[in-house]
Amino acid sequence: MTRRLSSLEVLLSVVVLLLLVCCVGLIVVSYLSLEPAGAEEPGRLRGRMVIKQGAEFSEELKNSSSLLFKSLAFDVQQLVSEAFSLSELKQAFRSCQVQRFSRGSVVVTFDLWFDQLIKPKEVEQQLEAGLQEADGGGLVIDRNSIHITENTEETTPAATSTTPAAGKTPTVTSTTPTAVTCSSDEMLCADWLTCVATDRLCDGVHDCPDASDEAAAHCATMCDGQFVLRGPNGSFSVTESDMKNISTFCRWIIRVDTGLSIRLDFPQFETEEQIDTLRLYEGVGPDKVLTAELSGFTPPGTAWLLTDQSTVEFFSDDIVTLPGFKATYSATNLSNLSDQEKLSCSFEDGMCFWRQLQDHDSNWIRTRGSTMPPNTGPSGDHTLENGSGFYIVTPLNPSQQPKTFRIHSLPLTPPTQPMCMSFWYHMFGDDVHRLRVLLLPLPWQPESAATVLFQKDGNYGNTWNYGQVTLNLTLKATVTFEALKKEGVFNDIALDDIMLTSAPCGPAPPEPTNVMPPMTPPPIPADCGGPFDLWEPNSTFSSPNYPQSYGNQAECVWTLHAAEGHNIQLHFLDFDVEATYDVVEVRDGVGPNSTLLAVLTGSDGPAHDLFSTANQIIVRFSTDKSGFGRGFKANFTSGVHLGAPALCTGGQFQCQTGSCIHGDGLCDSVVDCPDASDEADCIVLQVNGSNRLQFQLNSSLFTVCGDTWSSHLSNFTCQYLGYRTGETSLLPALPQDSPFVTITVTSNRTLETIVSGTCSRDQVVSLSCNNQPCGVRLASNVTSESDQSEDRVPGQGRVVGGVNAMEGAWPWIVSLQWRGHHRCGASLIGRDWLLTAAHCVYGKNIHLQSWEAVFGLHSQIHSDSEHVQTRRVDRVIFHRKYDRITKQADIAMMHLQQPISFTGMYQSADQLHRSIPISQSASPVNTNQPISFTGQYQSANQQHRPVGLKPADNT
């Protein structure tokens, strides 16, 4: 029988249940209140790394809503997830989310989530190991740039979703309902309420209320991992590995105690001149002031930043990598800096406290040794009087525009008595203009506010001169040294050993003497007063104004005459003209049939006398618009067979070198002459329309039988005659064709001849030679072959424009470079011979060490490609009929010091590797040949220089 509960028992049961519910509730509340914030993601870290290949930074990557941002972010997240799946953290890893991309190749900032707390260093090591094994899909990460830190800021809302590890659900973090949307050139602060311009990030000023824009997690430099440098001293650096193959931007903020200044020293400094630069600013943020810009190999010495907060920035490209720099800083109290300390400087330890306005025309440079070009500037400093001491100088001004160079002091405190500032100045060069010392209330004030204390004009020779000025200040002022340059290149002005003493100046130093400018000769007529016709005994002639400077843009012609049947011997007594640009050309004979004897330039002249074969010689002297030498002086004599070797006796053959061989050695298939001239003219094609082929054996001609003839022999014979290919037909033998010869190729690939009175088949060879296109392109050039202009008129204009060639389309094309710069193109026609245009090498045929042939170069900006090889040139041969004026026979050959090895990227234009006779035209009239070039092309109003190979159609 069931007993009913009493009301008291029911009440107690209800109370117990209520107490139990309260206990459970208290346990839950206690758990929630004791759990630390963010415990739902205990392993959240911030990462940073650099993509060095596979992506290029653009403004679009700043916009997290852009398709480019989303695409690259997805690829990076996939790559990171794959890397962790291959690491020891594959069980703990949850997801990765890209936050932003920034400059420096492409710098990626991303967040990582793990199931547990993991040390950043361990994550860094595991990610690096995983990336080494992962397939990047085209992305190459600089593993040395990976930097993992604790995440000190909230997740920035981004347009990309997180990428979880395989088999895991992505974590969705709630965002504050009041979060704002920033523009593409802004970043959202960690409070989700404030937007900051991206160019204000990591600038030393807290623009975000929570200072998240200056967080070390994403502001640390890729150079040495530092950002804000604090304390009385420290260091920062950039090494070669930091810059290798990537564009680099690094910024450091240096903070010392209030009221102190910063001293910078550079134990090591070696960067690419004007490209990889270190900029020093006083101050931080947008109000910072550029104080100095350093680059190159000259040690900067000590630099001073006169603020307690300063900014240092380093920029480099990804082309040339040098060792970089190491810098140390220390805090210094300069509050009691005297005027003497502000001004006195020997420049041995840097620029001291002298400053330059970085936005001014140009800056003085600190250097040592001699300056370039010669004949201007000092050869050493004044302090040490040798090449190891430092001084400052105005650098070469290539623009030829007037320039002003200013260096100014810190503001000087008015003294109780006059002071004397002394200095040493150097003004040497025909084009030197002016040096002034100015007193200005402030360095950036206009010239009208200046007081001129000192002024010198002109050339004072290659010597240091002493100068002094008395400073009698009543108000604060700055001292400014101002150098002014006009046109010309011989105009360097230098300063050294500036010193301030607390007493008035003594007696003025002796005035230096101006070097008189060179006398300007009266203008010389462009034709030198000619043309000149010279006969013996009036046989001595010289360049205009010899031995003084000759005229510019001259075109002078002398014609030397001898009696009919005589020839001429030309001798140069003295020769000195501007190398490359001023040229003496000597031609054998006159008119269109004259041949080129010599192209002379520089200071050496011909190694031996020149001999004509005709009774006239043309001497043509051409000069450009600048530069000169002494000129030349020459004389000539005439006679019979001057310079010719002694005639051979009867029954002998005279080689072109002058040596004699037995007459039986002529055309016997054996080379007896040193120049092979005994075998040079042994094949004859009759010109009566039948093209019957005849071989000369000894001194007799034989018609060739068709019995053993082949297509190989046809091509060989036509190439011997200067053509490319040949086609054979067989004609009936006629009685007048006798005697005959049968040609066969032996096993050792020599020709065997059998003379007979008949042909066994009564057929003789009729040979037609032609010039079919040579060379085999390794890649088709679809663009070149299909994109032809409809407006082009065949046969008119120069080779202009062209289209970009596919790599490997023209494997025989060579870039000819003169003194490191592309000059023109050439074709490889053998392992050690190039064919080019004569006008390209005209005047540059003497200083052969300046030439370099570059093979396998598809683009001028990819000269470091693995396919590229270079060779020096040791010989230049002009076509003997080349005429610079008429452009007739504009062909030349260049011989390489070392043969080239044929590869897939460079091959001979002639796959048969034959030589092309320089004395014969390479292609007949009215044939169309595809050509290619890497030179410059011109339009009506502008000039461009293509960087890639451009084929054109010569039609």
Image: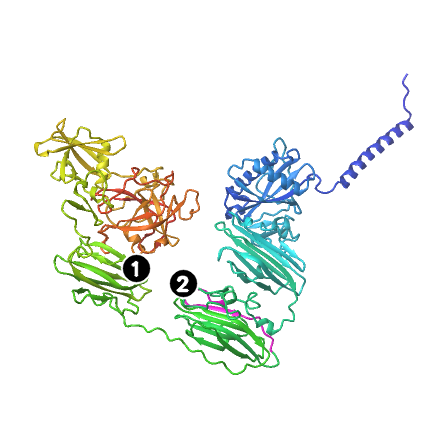
Q: Residue 285, can we see it?
A: no
Q: Dot 1 corresponds to which residue?
A: 601
- The amino acid pointed to by label 1 is Thr
Considering only order in the chain, which callout, 2 or 1, is on the residue closer to the N terminus?
2
Of 670 and 681, which appears nearest the observer?
A: 670
The picture places residue 486, in percent across and down from the top left corner, at 40, 69
Could you say whether the residue bearing mark 2 is in a helix, strand or loop? loop
- The amino acid pointed to by label 2 is Ser
Image position of 949 with respect to 744: above or below: below
Q: Dot 2 corresponds to which residue?
A: 399
Residue 778 is left or right of residue 530, and the answer is right
Of 875 and 465, which appears nearest the observer?
A: 875
Which residue is located at x 11 percent, y 33 percent?
Answer: 739
Q: Which residues are magenta?
A: 392-414
Point out which mark residue 808 bears. Answer: none
- Quarter of the picture containing the N terminus is top right
Q: Spot the residue most to the left.
A: 735
The picture places residue 332, in percent across and down from the top left corner, at 65, 65
| 410 inside magenta stretch | yes
Callout 1: few (<14), some (14-19), or many (20+) C-alpha neighbours within 10 Å?
A: many
Of 726 and 49, which appears nearest the observer?
A: 726
The picture places residue 801, in percent across and down from the top left corner, at 32, 48
Could you say whether the residue bearing mark 1 is in a helix, strand or loop? loop
